Image: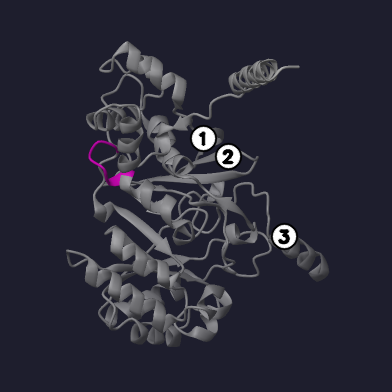
């Protein structure tokens, strides 16, 4: 074989390989971008990658989050060529609703199935002046607070931005009444569902950015609240990038008790937690207070002496206190305190100058009350099994 023939054969081989690679690439489906989960900045980058101007971001945010549209063909202020291109490279993929039930008090709960088989829960609480949506940030919870049903389910994974903001999208669509003028039923969002939001930091921050954006949900920073059990370093990081309202799950006036109720306290004790809370408040441009969440449990943290201790602990932290009577769930080992004991606890804090509310129990007939959200968690931590084994031993 001559050198020329050898070169020709090699060229033929390369051409055959190129054809095979092209055929394989054609068989492999393009992984489409889910536009539901793009923050405004990431949406800008997406359209720039398509050679489009940034004004497309505003258009798309309005179509998805304000008009609830997921079909590109119906986005009539974009050219047909643009819509065809979007259909090739992008999608608007929504969480799947597997359960939708309304309580006798009007509270509504959705269970949404996520890729992988696990499910999360989202709760809407209607009131006279507002409608509050309680949103999950993780499947299960990486923490193990002893009084919380979610924590007993173990932990599977963080939710993506699309899965977090998708809860707001789905709830908004479900709450709309066909034929009626569009009314904003969701006025407040609280990151208080399943999971610890600050352990899913980037995705939660991007989701809250969409909640606040004028072309998306246009909520006030005072009406979006992040609740944390006290991941101190991430509280400081949050203060650098966001000014949403802050709620702190305290639940005890002393470190000894909080170590039992909220185990992360062993790493970030109360003094460090409240110092981080004060730093966050100092960075806000207005005189907002933190909300201190205190689940009040019979014979655990409901005494007058503990109310006195709580007042002393919080005296230097601008805050209002939200007392949450414990919502029972199977095998918790805890009980709900009497109304008289809860009122006495509240009254003492009032006397010490604090603004205190007692959270009404809503949705407990459909297991949608605070601390009752469980979803369906494919537990990677084996925490569920630990509690099942423990209960069998006790029985």
Say whether disc 2 or disc 1 marks the residue closer to the N-terminus.
1
The x and y percentages for residue 36 are: 41, 34
Q: Earlier in the sequence, mark 3 or mark 1?
A: 1
378 or 255, nearer to the observer: 378
In the picture of the structure, the residue carrying the numbered disc 1 is 95
| Residue nearest the observer in this picture, 96 or 276 | 276
Q: CA distance from mark 2 to mark 1?
A: 7 Å
CA–CA distance in space, label 3 to label 1? 26 Å
Q: Which residues are magenta?
A: 210-216
Disc sitting over residue 182 in the figure: none
User: Residue 227 falls in which quadrant of the image?
Assistant: bottom left
Residue annotated with mark 3 = 382
Display colour scheme: one colour
Q: Are marks 2 and 1 in contact (CB under 8 Å)?
A: yes
Q: In which quadrant will I find the C terminus?
A: bottom right
Q: Is residue 95 visible?
A: yes
Secondary element at image label 3 = loop
Is 310 displayed left or right of 378 in the figure?
left
Packing grade of label 2 (10 A; few <14, some 14-19, many >=20) is: some
Q: Residues within 10 Å of mark 1 (few under 14, many from 20)?
A: many
Q: Is residue 190 magenta?
A: no
Q: Earlier in the sequence, mark 3 or mark 2?
A: 2
The quarter in which the N terminus is drawn is top right
Q: Which residue is mark 2?
A: 114
Residue at 54%, 80% (x, y): give it. 266
Mark 3 neighbour density, 10 Å: few (under 14) some (14–19) many (20 or more): some
- The percent position of residue 172, horizontal first and vertical second, equals 37, 34
The correct choice, above or below, for 242 with respect to 111 in the image is below
Based on the displayed image, in which of its 4 quarters is residue 343 positioned? bottom left
């Amino acid at each position: 074989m001559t050198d020329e023939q050898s070169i020709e054969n090699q060229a033929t081989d390369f051409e055959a390989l190129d054809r095979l690679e092209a055929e394989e690439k054609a068989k492999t489906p393009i992984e489409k971008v889910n536009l539901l989960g793009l923050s405004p900045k990431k949406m800008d980058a997406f359209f720039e990658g398509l050679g489009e101007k940034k004004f497309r971001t505003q258009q798309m945010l309005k179509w998805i989050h304000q008009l609830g549209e997921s079909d590109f063909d119906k986005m009539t202020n974009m050219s047909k060529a643009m819509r065809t291109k979007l259909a090739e490279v992008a999608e608007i993929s929504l969480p799947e609703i597997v359960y939708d039930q309304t309580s006798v008090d009007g509270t509504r709960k959705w269970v949404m199935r996520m890729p992988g088989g696990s499910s999360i829960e989202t709760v809407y609480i209607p009131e006279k002046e507002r409608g509050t949506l309680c949103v999950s940030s993780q499947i299960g919870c990486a923490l193990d607070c002893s009084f919380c049903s979610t924590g007993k389910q173990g932990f599977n994974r963080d939710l993506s931005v699309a899965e977090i903001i998708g809860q707001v999208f789905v709830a908004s669509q479900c709450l709309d009444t066909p034929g009626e003028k569009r009314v904003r039923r969701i006025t407040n969002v609280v990151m208080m569902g399943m999971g610890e939001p600050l352990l899913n930091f980037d995705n939660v921050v991007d989701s809250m950015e969409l909640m606040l954006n004028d072309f998306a949900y246009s909520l006030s920073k005072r009406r979006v609240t992040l609740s944390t059990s006290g991941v101190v370093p991430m509280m400081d990081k949050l203060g650098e990038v966001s000014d949403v309202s802050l709620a702190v799950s305290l639940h005890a006036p002393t470190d000894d008790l909080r170590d039992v109720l909220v185990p992360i306290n062993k790493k970030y004790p109360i003094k460090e937690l409240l110092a981080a809370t004060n730093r966050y408040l100092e960075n806000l441009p207005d005189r907002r207070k933190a909300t201190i969440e205190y689940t009040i449990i019979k014979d655990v943290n409901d005494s007058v002496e503990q109310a006195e201790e709580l007042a002393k602990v919080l005296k230097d932290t601008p805050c209002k206190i939200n007392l949450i009577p414990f919502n029972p769930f199977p095998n918790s080992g805890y009980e709900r305190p009497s109304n008289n004991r809860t009122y006495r606890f509240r009254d003492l804090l009032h006397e010490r100058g604090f603004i205190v509310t007692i959270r009404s129990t809503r949705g407990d007939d459909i297991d949608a009350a605070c601390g009752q959200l469980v979803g369906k968690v494919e537990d990677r931590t084996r925490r569920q099994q630990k509690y099942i084994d423990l209960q069998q031993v006790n029985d």
